Image: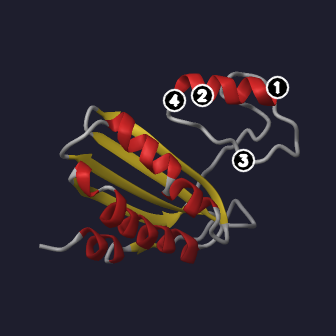
Amino acid sequence: MATIAQTVRTVNTVRTVNLWSPKAMYAAIRQYELGAGSVTNFMRIVDQGIAETLASQPGFVSYHVLATGADEVVSVTMFDDEQGAIRSNEIAAEFVRDRLAPFQINLTAAFTGEVGVSRIQPRQHRFGRGLPADAGPHRRTPDPEADRQEHTNKA
């Protein structure tokens, strides 16, 4: 049986030609099943650990983690280049091994490829208020109260 690191590293990369955008973006999508622990605690550790690590990588565009079930999460990492997306899989495998062992994580699917279609509203915030053009990356904390406080302090 392959380890998580081996599985992530052997994922096929899909190469396509993006005819609609002069600059390509690449995504790494990973789906995990938690064998123990809560999604809330998982999100807290991810927010305090790998989210900042990925954000500091060259070519980083965005990182999102979705709770898609009571014991399932999906991460979506976007980079300006294919190497960044592939590198994010390696970083994720190390993080899962080193920091998420108590959750008994099982990688159930992983995909890496060029984004073919994308729509982004950079000036819209999830609360419906516009952000200034020079606003930095929005950081969503897993604690709704802390998120409201962070948003209030920036407004």
Query: CA gap, disc 4 to disc 2?
Result: 5 Å
Which is in the foreground here, disc 3 or disc 1?
Answer: 1
Query: CA gap, disc 1 to disc 2?
Result: 14 Å
- Residue type indicated by callout 2: Ala
Residue at the spot of label 3: 137
Residue at the spot of label 2: 146
Please name whichever residue, 79 or 13, is drawn nearer the observer in this view of the structure: 79
Question: Dot 2 lies on which element?
Answer: helix
State which quarter of the image contains the N terminus. Answer: bottom left
Q: Residue at x 80, y 31 (%)?
A: 154
Question: Dot 1 lies on which element?
Answer: loop
Mark 4 or mark 3, which is nearer the start of the sequence?
3
Query: CA gap, disc 3 to disc 4?
Result: 18 Å
Question: Dot 4 lies on which element?
Answer: loop
Please name whichever residue, 33 or 44, is drawn nearer the observer in this view of the structure: 44
Residue lying farthest to the right in this orientation:
133
- The answer to whether 7 appears left or right of 88 in the picture is left
- Residue type indicated by callout 4: Asp
Which is in the foreground here, disc 2 or disc 3?
Answer: 2
Image position of 89 with respect to 117: above or below: below
Q: Residue at x 48, y 66 (%)?
A: 113
Please name whichever residue, 117 or 19, is drawn nearer the observer in this view of the structure: 117
Asked if marks 4 and 2 touch (Cβ < 8 Å), the reply is yes
Mark 1 or mark 3, which is nearer the start of the sequence?
3
Crowding at dot 1, Cα within 10 Å, few <14 / some 14-19 / many 20+, comes out as few
Query: CA gap, disc 2 to disc 3?
Result: 17 Å
Q: Residue at x 69, y 30 (%)?
A: 150
Asked if marks 2 and 3 touch (Cβ < 8 Å), the reply is no
Residue at the spot of label 1: 155
- Quarter residue 89 falls in: bottom left
Q: Which mark is residue 143?
A: 4
